[in-house]
Amino acid sequence: MPDPSAFSSEIDADSVREVTAAGLLRGNQQGKNTTRSEMNASSKPSLAVRLRQRAEMLREIRRFFDDRGFIEVQPPCLSRDCVVDAFLDPIEVESSQVGLFGELDSPTKFYLQTSPESAMKRLLAEGAPSIYAITPVFRKGETGARHNVEFSMLEWYEVGGDAASAIELLGNLAVEVLQSPSFKTVTYRDAFAKHLGFDPIEVPIVDLHGLVDEMDSSLAESIGLDRDALLDVLLSERIEPVFANDTPTILTRYPLTQAALAKPCQDDPQCAERFELFYRGVELANGYDELLDADELKKRYEHNNEIRMAHGRPALAVETTLLRAMRQGLPACSGVALGIDRLLMLRVDAHSIEDVVPLPTTRA
């Protein structure tokens, strides 16, 4: 890693290490309508091919959700507040730059959204049915082979859904888009027990620290005795590589301390109904049986602000539009966020996000 600042309550494990996807281009993944004249003489596909591949995948995704009764929505990229995440930094825009400074009820600043979550949950609280969105999101300072400051996110919420239905939907989407014959699931605890030989929740924290220290002593020193941060490193370095195969794998039932916005598991109070999708060692999606308790959300936001300030980041407003929406009443639902650009990278065996984003931030 890595820098502990890469850790998040909605953990992007690929901040830990940049791993390129390997393999040959699948013929039917290169774009069903591409022509020989569109290909460059080099092995790297032309811009025309990449644009066609992206458009075809987006059509497949929309058809997948449309066929299941979801409604596509377009949440705003710019909003008066944002999700309070411990390590994700939103990009701020002064109200004067928007032309609204001094207007009635105008905030002093707006935020480019790190996720469409707040807006979509506000729609659900106002009565929207199951919805999905494919939208740009923004995260300050995120660059690399799998990162771009602006990237595309697919996010959906199934009204009445739970962890089981969300995992099934996510797995079926992965099977269809990645053209895999099946998907599999494994619990967080079972993954650690199988590949590292201990229970990640019960193991003494000094043992976790010792394992990370063997890998990177300076990283271990910077993390200290932060259990979740230590687990993140071990997950990324020792377990995720095991998922580097051609079967989409969904890791389920994360520790409650990594619950983000997920409900606790009814049969295991130490775990939460949170899950993530991995394919060829790459983390693609993060999902929850969504938290409905506004008071609990406020507590988690306040805790995230404590972490932000401990790492030199400014606190973010806790009394957000999302919090008000949850007090109004958020229906029982499941939610999943998936990185479109990474999904396309794996679908076409690209080595960098710049290969699939037509104009990345470095050239925008």
Image (cartoon, rainbow, N blue to C red):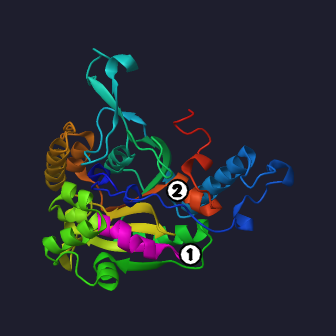
Looking at the rendering, the stretch of residues picked out in magenta corresponds to 233-250
Q: As rendered, which of 272 and 231 lies closer to the eye?
A: 231
- Residue receiving disc 1: 246
Which quadrant: the N terminus?
A: bottom left
- Residue receiving disc 2: 342
Q: Position of residue 107 (x, y in %)?
A: 26, 25
Element at label 2? helix
Q: Which residue: 68% across, 54% down?
A: 53
Magenta segment main secondary structure: helix
Residue 319 seen anywhere in this rendered image of the structure: yes
Left or right of residue 357, residue 316 in this image? left
- Cβ–Cβ under 8 Å for marks 2 and 1: no
Which of the two discs, 2 and 1, labels the residue nearer the N terminus? 1
| Amino acid on which the number 1 mark rests in the picture | Asp
| Amino acid on which the number 2 mark rests in the picture | Arg
Label 1: few (<14), some (14–19) or many (≥20) C-alpha neighbours in 10 Å: some
